[in-house]
């Protein structure tokens, strides 16, 4: 790539970040933003599988700069360990060249490794859940309503989730995993990529939110993509709660709802931490994640048309 093209790409990236992150720009464009957001409800493209419920193509969203995120290059999902043979065939059709697994080893041990097409294996890139998975296993395994209430009730589950989201920003090891993923997505030699965690909503949700905003997708649209996990997961999560109650392991499985859902409050915890630590979204990208302008420009060039 010539120096002229790099400079132009970097300039485009800077302009995009200004539009996406400055409050004045957001306020001035409030009307078109609402129009864009209305369109976004129709652009979320689910990949229907039997063994995973929150699988989506991240493409289709429009940007502040008049572009559109390319489809068929970035996918987000929940864990892929329960895929059926038909699911594996569907996933094979996506042409993936890389699958990134944000789960910690304990999650993989309990839920199983990803079931993927031949020749494709997951890249382990664990992002800390602050011990939530172990806490959840312990609470359910106790079978004791009092213990479960003490561990998850009284707002404790919600507080736990807010703490987890803050560590997406504060923990150097977590930032390193997200940064490595963004660098790979910017690499023009890389084919389609899928990343996931267990439920495809928190670590995967934050990664997707950051990526969309880095591509100059309006903040409100990126938030709606994040919150859409509640729609895709609702029936499955309700079935899990019903099963736990029927089996006698939980008298009040609704204690799990704050852990099963994504909430604006959780996302706000991360973005507030980001602004406190780095001053802005752009500061988080460049200082927190260590991404230079060339990488950010390549990300735009590859993923936005």
Image (tube, helix red, strand yellow):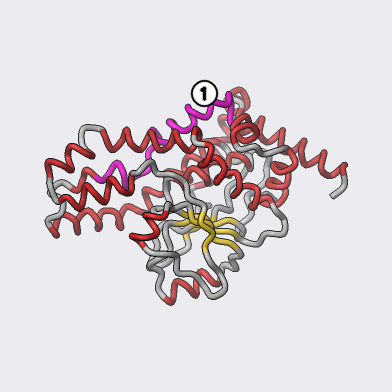
Structural crowding at the residue carrying mark 1, measured as other residues with C-alpha within 10 Å and reported as few (<14), some (14–19) or many (≥20): few
The residue tagged with tag 1: helix, strand or loop? helix
Q: Is 279 part of what is drawn in magenta?
A: yes
Q: Position of residue 50 (x, y in %)?
A: 38, 68
Report the residue at 61% width, 26% height from top: 22
Left or right of 293 in this view: 260 = left
Q: Is residue 85 above or below residue 134?
A: below
Q: Is 80 located above or below residue 277 in the figure?
A: below
Q: Examine the image and state in which quarter residue 65 appears.
A: top right
Residue found at x 59% / y 41%: 217
Q: Main secondary structure of the magenta part?
A: helix
Image label count: 1
Question: In the image, is residue 276 part of the stretch drawn in magenta?
Answer: yes
Q: Which residue is mark 1?
A: 276
Side of 213 where 89 appears, left or right: left
Q: Residue 302: x, y in percent?
A: 70, 52
Magenta stretch? 256-282
Residue 163 image point, x, y percent: 38, 34
At x 71% / y 38%, what residue is drawn? 292
């Amino acid at each position: 790539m010539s120096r002229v093209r790099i400079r132009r790409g970097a300039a485009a990236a800077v302009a995009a970040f200004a539009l996406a992150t400055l409050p004045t720009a957001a306020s001035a464009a409030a009307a078109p933003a609402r129009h864009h957001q209305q369109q976004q409800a129709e652009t979320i493209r689910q990949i229907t599988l039997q063994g995973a419920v929150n699988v989506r193509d991240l493409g289709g969203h429009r940007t502040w700069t008049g572009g559109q995120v390319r489809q068929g290059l970035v996918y987000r999902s929940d864990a892929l360990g329960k895929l059926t043979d038909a699911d594996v065939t569907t996933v094979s059709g996506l042409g993936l060249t890389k699958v990134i697994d944000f789960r910690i080893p304990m999650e993989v041990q309990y839920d199983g490794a990803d079931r993927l097409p031949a020749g494709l294996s997951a890249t382990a890139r664990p992002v800390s859940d602050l011990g939530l998975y172990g806490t959840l296993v312990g609470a359910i395994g106790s079978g004791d309503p009092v213990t479960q209430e003490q561990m998850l009730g009284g707002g404790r589950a919600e507080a736990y989730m807010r703490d987890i989201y803050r560590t997406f920003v504060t923990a150097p090891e977590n930032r390193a995993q997200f940064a490595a993923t963004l660098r790979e997505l910017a690499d023009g030699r890389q084919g389609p990529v899928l990343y996931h965690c267990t439920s495809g909503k928190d670590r995967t949700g934050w990664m997707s939110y950051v990526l969309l905003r880095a591509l100059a997708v309006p903040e409100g649209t990126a938030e709606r993509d994040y919150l859409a996990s509640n729609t895709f997961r609702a029936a499955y999560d309700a079935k899990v709660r019903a099963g736990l109650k029927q089996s006698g392991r939980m008298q009040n499985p609704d204690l799990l709802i704050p852990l099963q859902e994504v909430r604006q409050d959780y996302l706000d915890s991360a973005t507030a931490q980001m602004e406190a630590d780095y001053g802005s979204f752009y500061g988080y990208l460049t200082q927190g994640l260590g991404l230079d302008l060339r990488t950010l420009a390549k990300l735009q060039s590859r993923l936005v048309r």
